[in-house]
Image (cartoon, grey):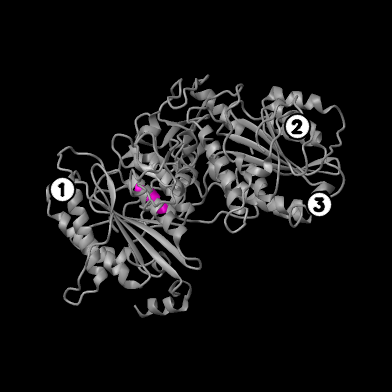
Amino acid sequence: MGDEEEPKEYRWETGYEKTWEAIKEDDDGFLEASVADIIQRAKRKRQTQKTGTTKLGMMRHLYILLDCSDAMSSQDLKPTRLLCTIKLLDGFIEEFFDQNPISQMGVIIMHNKRAEKISDLAGNSHKHVKQINSLNRTSLVGEPSIQNGLEMALSSLKLLPTHASREILIIMGSLTTCDPSDINVTIETLKQEGVRCSVIGLAAEVHVCRQLANQTGGTYNVILDDCHFKDLLYQQVDPPPAAVCLDSSLIKMGFPHQMEADGKEEPLTMCMCHVDSVDEGSKLTTGGYYCPQCYSKYCELPVECRACGLTLVSAPHLARSYHHLFPAANYTEVAFEKQVSLCFACQKTFTETDKQVYSCPNCSKTFCLDCDIFIHDTLHTCPGCATNLSTFQITHTS
Amino acid sequence: MNNIVLKRESNTDFSSTDETSLLVVIFDSNPGQQFLRDNTHVLTHCLDSIIAFSNAHLMQKAQNKLAVMACHSKTSQFIFPGPGKPIDIRQTDGQYEIFTMVEKTIKHNLSKLLGSDISNILTESLLAGTIAMALCYIARMQRIKSPGIKINSRILLVTGSSDSASQYMNYMNVFFTAQKHNVVIDVCALDQHLSLLQQGCDITGGLYLKLPQLQGLLQYLLWVFLPEPPIREKLVLPPPVKVDYRAACFCHRELIDIGFVCSVCLSIFCKFSPICTTCHTVFKMPGPLAVKQKKKKLKL
C-alpha cells in the first residue's frame, strides 16, 4: 500500500505478488513482530526520502472534509468508522499544530448531499478538537457530496494570499458521491488554484478520488486497518513540498518578550485580546506578552497585534518546525562486526543479537536500531554530530 | 518544614515504590570556561559538590537511578556509569558502597577525560549534544524498565559557559523532545546568564538558577534541585525569572525583537533580503507590500 500505482495499469496486469510470504510467524507463532518489521522498514524508507533541501509549504491552510454519511456508521472499524475517525483526528489535530505552528485548519462535514462547515480556518487546536468531538452525536444520513465539500473549501481557500500553501484532506467512508454538476470541472479549478487534495478512503479505491488526488498533486490511500489509518493520517502532519505556483515573501513578525522589570513588580494592565469581548471581560493582570512595536499586551501567542497589525509569535513556535527543514542525516546500515562495543548515544552494549548497527555519515559514530528510530522520529539531532566541534553545525549549513 | 512532610504523605502517588526517579547530571568540564580559567581549583570544589549532590539523590530512595555526564571541550561522555565494568569497591569507613563507587567512578573517568585533552585551544561547550545523548539514554531506560514501574526522569545541567546561538537548532530540538517525553531540564548557571537554556527550563517545566555565589554550590543544589518536581511547588524557591523568548536571526545569530520570516521555510532574518539564504527562495516584493499581504492572510 501507499505506493503510487500507474493509473492505466490494472491490478492483474502487474506481477504476481505473494503478499502472504512477506509475513512470517515468529518463534511463538505471532505475527506482530513481522508486521512491526514491515512498518519499521516503511518508516526507514520514508525517512530516506526526506532531504533537507526541498522547499516545503510551511504556512499551511488545511481543510478537513469529513464524510458524515450513512457509510460512516459501518462497524468495520471499532466501534464505528466515525467514532474511530474522531478519535484519530483528535490526536492528528494536536500533532498538526504542534508541528505546523503558524498553520491554520478548518473542518467541513459532508452529509445528506450537503456540505456544512463546522469550524472555520483558525490556528487554535482546542476549538477544532471541541467541534470534532461534538460530531459523535450527529445523525449519519444520506450520501456525501464531494463536489459540494470541495466547492465550500475552495471558496474560503481562494481568498488566501499566494504564499500560503492550500490543502484539502478528504476522509471518505462512502463509495459513492452525489454531486450537482460535473465534478471534473471542480477538479480542474482546484488544479488551477494549486490546492493540493489528498484522500484517505475507508472502504475501497474509488476512481474519482484517485483522479482528484492525481490531478491536484495529493496522495490517495485506502486504509487496511485502524493502525494503518493512523499511519496514513499522521503522514499528513509533515508539510508537503511547496507547490510550484506558490509565491514566497518575507513576512514581518514580532517576537514579544516580557517587560524588563528589575526588582520592582510589573504594573497591572489589561490585555488587548479580551479588552472588548463581551462574554469574557478583560482582567487586570501582571505579566503577558508585549508587542515590540506598540507595547500592546496579549495573553496568548501567536496573535496579530490589534493596534499595529504585526504578527506576534514566540521563537520556539517557529523553532518547532525547523527540523522539517534541517533533518538529521540518515544513518547507513552496517553489519555488526564488533567495530564498537557501545551505542554512542544510549550506552547500550552491542551483543550478538544486534545484527545491524547504524552509523552517521557526518560524525561516523555508531548507534543502535532503537536510537536510530528515536533520533530520526523525535529528536531530529544526531547526538554524535552535536557533540563534535567539527560537525555540530553540518545540518544547519548543508 | 512540618508542613512539607505532611503534604508529602498525603500525596501517595510519588511515594509508592513503583516509581523511580532517574537523574542525569551534566557537568560542563570544559577548561575554556571563564571561571575555571580564573581559578583552576574551583573545578575540584564543583566536582565535590556534584558528587555529594548525586549521592544525596541516591540516598532519597533505594530505587533512584543516577547517571553523570561530562561535557568536555571536544567530546561528551558518560562518567557514571562509565564504559566497561564497574570498578571493585571495598567498604571504607562504613560508607555505603554505592556512594564510594559513585565517587571513585566519577573521579576516575573524569581524570581520564581531562588527561586525554591537553590542547589549549578555547572552544565552546556543546551542551545541546550532551543533552541529546542524555535523552537517548533516558529513552533506553524507559524501554528496558520492567513493566509496572514508572520512571520520572530529569536532567540537571551545571555549567559556567556562555550561551551560544550557533547551537540554537540543536537546543530547540532537545527541548521539544524533552517536553514530549516529560523529561524535566533544570539548569544551574555557575557564571553567566544563559537565556537559551532558560527557555528550555521554561518549556520543560524545570528550574533555572543563576548561582549568586559559587561557594554555596552544594547548598543551592540540595535546596533547589534535589526535590522532585512535584514537591517543588510546595517549597519556597527562588522566584522564577522572566523568560526572554526572542528569536535569533539566521543571518547574524543575534537576538531580535522584530524580524522577517520566510514564508517557505520560516527562517528568521533581521533585515529584508531579496533571497532566502536557507531555502534559496527569491522573494518578489519589498517590505511594505509584504506587510499588507500578511494582514489579508490572518483574517480568521
Near-viewer residue (A314 or A98): A98
Near-viewer residue (A10 or A249): A10
Q: Mark 3 or mark 2: which is in front?
A: 2
Q: In terms of secondary structure, where does tag 1 sit?
A: helix
Q: From which residue to which does the magenta span run?
A: B197-202
Q: Quadrant of residue A161?
A: top right
Distance in Å between CA atoms under marks 3 and 2: 27 Å
Is residue A335 on the magenta stretch? no
Q: Quadrant of the C terminus of chain B?
A: top right
Q: In terms of secondary structure, where does tag 2 sit?
A: helix
Q: Which residue is mark 3?
A: A74
Is residue B198 on the magenta stretch? yes
Tag 3–tag 2 contact (CB < 8 Å): no
Can the viewer see residue B26 in this picture? yes
- Residue type highlighted by circle 2: Arg
Can the viewer see residue B242 in this picture? no
Mark 3: few, some, or many residues within 10 Å (few <14, many ≥20)?
some
Q: Mark 1 or mark 3: which is in front?
A: 1
Mark 2: few, some, or many residues within 10 Å (few <14, many ≥20)?
few
Tag on residue A218? none
> Which secondary structure dominates the residues rendered in magenta?
helix
Above or below for A362 versus B195: above
Q: Quadrant of the N terminus of chain B?
A: bottom left
Q: Which residue is mark 2?
A: A11
Tag on residue B115? 1
Q: Are marks 3 and 2 on the same chain?
A: yes
